[in-house]
Structures are given as C-alpha cells and as structure tokens.
Amino acid sequence: MSAPAPKITEAEWTVMRVFWQLGEASLGDVVRALEDQLEWKPRTVQSLMRRLVEKGALVSESQGRDFRYRPAFSQDECQLDEGKTFLQRVFDGRLTPFVAAMVEKEEISRDEIRELRALLDEAEKKTSTRKRS
Amino acid sequence: MSAPAPKITEAEWTVMRVFWQLGEASLGDVVRALEDQLEWKPRTVQSLMRRLVEKGALVSESQGRDFRYRPAFSQDECQLDEGKTFLQRVFDGRLTPFVAAMVEKEEISRDEIRELRALLDEAEKKTSTRKRS
DNA sequence: ATCCAAAGATTACGCTCGTAATCCTGAGCC
DNA sequence: GGCTCAGGATTACGAGCGTAATCTTTGGAT
C-alpha cells in the first residue's frame, strides 16, 4: 500500500482544509483563501506548506517560476487516521465509549441523535446483506 | 466553575491512566505499574509527573519525606475535553461525520453497531421524557 | 555509624511547532 | 533599464515534548 497519511498538526489542518476545498493551489491562493479568517503572514503559510511537503501531505509540481501544490491524501484518509489515533490515545481504541460520553455529557441535540441512528440503521442493513469479511 | 482540564500529551495520558486506576499513588507506585508495559526510566516518569503537577492535572501532597499524587480531574472530564478538541480540529466540531467515517471505512463490528444503537435509544428516551434544559 | 536506594530538584538535549524574518531571483510595469 | 512584488530557500527563536542524567537528601537496612 502507499505511504500512510502523515501526522498533521493543528495549524497544518487549517492549510489542508483549503487544499481539500480547492483541490490544487498556489501559495498565493492559500494566502488569499485564509486572509479573512486569520492573520497569518504569507511567510507563515509558506512555512506550513513547506513542512507539509516535507512530511508528504502535499505534493508540489514546478509550474514555470512558481509551484502548484495539491494534497497527497484525501481528507477522508486523514480524518480516519486522526480519528483512530485519537481513540487509541484517549478511549483505548473504542468508539462506543466516546459516543457515550458525548451523548451523556454534552447533551447532543435530538436531531443529531436521530442522524446517528439513521446512519447506524443503514450500516447494519449493509453488513447484514454482506458476508463477514 | 473550576479550572478547565489542561492539555495532556500522549506520554502524559499513559501516566494519567495509572492514576485513574489507582486513585492516588507515589512515584514508585506509578513506576511499578508501568514497568512491564514499557521501559521508562524512573526519572522519566518523574519528569512527566512533575509536568502534570505544573499544568494542574495532578495534585501533590507532602506525606512525610515523599509525596503522594492524585488526579485533579476525572478521566471523564479529560476524555470529553480531548474529544471536543479533536472533533473541532478534524471534523468541524461535529460528531456525526466522525461516526459515519468510522462505520463506513473501518468496518465497525456489528456488535459495536448494536451497542451504539442501544446507547442512542436510551439517550433518546431520556431526552424525550425530560424537559429541555 | 555507614551505606544504599528511593525520590525530590535541577539540568539537558535534540525535535517539532507556531510564527515568522531575511535574502534572493525572476517577471511584469513604467 | 530600474522598481516592485510574489514566491522560493534559508534561517530564527522561544515553547513544549520525549526522554532522560546528575546532584542532593533522607529514611531504612546492616
């Protein structure tokens, strides 16, 4: 299989989200996409992007004098990876206790509970019509 | 309200888990509790505990020549806090997409799906018989 | 009385992160 | 032909982290 999704830090997630929206972008594109929601200097954004390239989360291709960058991993891959790491660290790898805590302590809205149930019904239907892997 | 639960790092979670099991412990207790599952030198454990005291996650009380330490926050508090931070960073603060990703991509076991559904049923019953807070 | 082992206090060291600044180069504008 | 501006390359710098070592004190064993 291909390389695993690298560990992405807090600030880097902000940058990656831009790429997952735009698909591909130059430094300027990212700076402009972010300039109204936070006040990072262009050099800061460049640093983050350089580190993301170094750790393999972005790929860069030379386009004339400048570069174009695009994500090396889908948002889904990174989210899943991050999620598993989080569960491992905090909930011994198990999802159920996390959901239980959120539901009990955080007063998740009834809408969200219904959403979740619908989702689980759907999943159960699928696994029941498919042989166990 | 009291101070918010401090940010606990990976290695520190390992230490805190021991305290949540033991309730209260000396340095030696923690060292002995950990020595078979990883090879941390006693000074390493001491460093982690010192930092945990500094950041307010442990409280220490002088007991004769040594100290006894105990957690300043419950495991539930810390887990919930960490969970909310995680969702914020990775899933825009929403639980449902996370569960959806785990269910779709990770082939969560049918047992776990049933567990989750039971949990949600229970929660729904409670919120429906209780006036909104 | 002596010596050891456990634990507190202090210090270390290389890495990553957040947040840039500096320096350089080339492209476009006047 | 200079000036400016964007963007690449290099460097910075303090905080936090992982992982300890060293120095010091002291209670317990012999």
Image (cartoon, coloured by chain):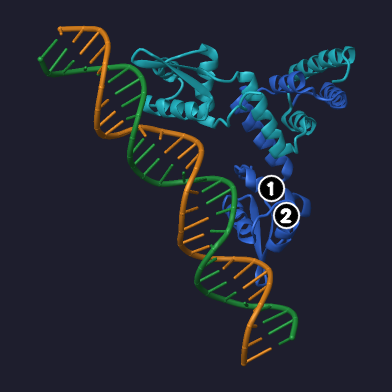
Chain colours: A cyan, B blue, C orange, D green
Q: Dot 1: few (<14), some (14–19), or many (≥20) neighbours within 10 Å?
A: some
Of badges 1 and 2, the one in the foreground is 2
| Quarter where residue B77 is shown | top right
- Is residue B42 visible from the viewing direction of this image? yes
* Distance CA(mark 1)–CA(mark 2): 9 Å
Q: Which residue is mark 1?
A: B14
| Quarter where residue A94 is shown | top right
Q: Looking at the picture, does residue B34 appear above or below residue A116?
A: below
| Quarter where residue A9 is shown | top right
Q: Looking at the picture, does residue B106 appear above or below residue B46?
A: above
Please give the chain letter of the residue carrying mark 1: B
Q: Position of residue A56 (x, y in %)?
A: 53, 26
Residue at position x 60%, y 42% from top? B7
Please give the chain letter of the residue carrying mark 2: B
- Is residue B93 visible from the viewing direction of this image? no
Residue at position x 62%, y 23% from top? A2
Query: Amino acid under label 2?
Result: Leu
Query: Amino acid under label 1?
Result: Thr
Q: Earlier in the sequence, mark 1 or mark 2?
A: 1
Circles 1 and 2, Cβ within 8 Å, touching? The answer is yes
Callout 1: SS: helix
Q: Dot 2: few (<14), some (14–19), or many (≥20) neighbours within 10 Å?
A: some
B126 or B112, which is in the foreground? B112
Say left or right for B123 vs C12: right
Q: Position of residue B110 (x, y in %)?
A: 87, 23
Q: Position of residue A126 (x, y in %)?
A: 84, 13
Callout 2: SS: helix
Can you say which quadrant of the picture contains the C terminus of chain A? top right
Q: Which residue is mark 2?
A: B34
